[in-house]
Amino acid sequence: NLSNLVLGELKVINLSGLHVPESYLAAIMQIAARKNQWSLDRTTFYTHVTKWQNINDIDEPIQNICLIEGLYLEGARWDIENNCLIEQTNKQLIQMMPLIKIIPIETNRINRNNYLATPVYITSDRRNAMGIGFVFEASLYTKKDLSHWILNGVCLLLNTDS
């Protein structure tokens, strides 16, 4: 419906299409802080990887949440059935991720157990000549020790080089 598109909020956004994706994420936190009467400096967000590959797969109401698409996982694979990181195959270096929820939360309420703070970069170069490239950290669930994934260089990318 065109009126929902014009008057409503975007439900799914591709961060790679934004010039400054950090601004969009900051706006989400500001809106949540204002709505919930949280102090902005005590507001953060965490991520939750969904089972949905695209907007057409969504089978439940998605009010008051933000979904991002177009992220690629490097250094691991995502197991949709078990909702966790697993080893990558030899032939697949980069995998398209399902839709990811961005969920604002107060910093003292966030659970970091078994979640890898995964850096999200604009490109696989991880930074440009000016040192710019880091966007945010996504929380990805794992059953393995966090150091395993850190040593594998696991990250998420907004753009692939291919």
Image: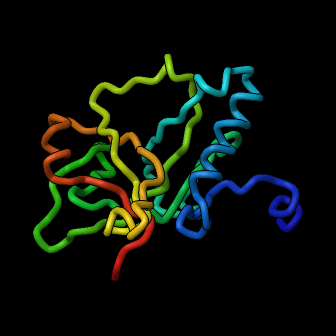
How many marks can you see? 0
Q: Position of residue 25 (x, y in %)?
A: 60, 47
Does 31 sit above or below residue 22?
above
The C terminus - image quarter = bottom left
- Residue lying at the far top of the rendered structure: 108
Q: Residue at x 49, y 55 (%)?
A: 99
Residue 26's quadrant in the figure?
A: top right
Left or right of residue 48, residue 76 in this image: left
The N terminus - image quarter = bottom right
Left or right of residue 72, residue 55 in this image: right
- Residue lying at the far front of the rendered structure: 130
Q: Residue at x 56, y 37 (%)?
A: 103
Left or right of residue 63, residue 156 in this image: left
Q: Position of residue 89 (x, y in %)?
A: 14, 65
Q: Position of residue 135 (x, y in %)?
A: 47, 53
Does 66 sit above or below residue 112?
below
Q: Nearer the viewer, residue 63 or 155?
A: 155
Q: Nearer the viewer, residue 2 or 81?
A: 2
Q: Position of residue 115 (x, y in %)?
A: 31, 34
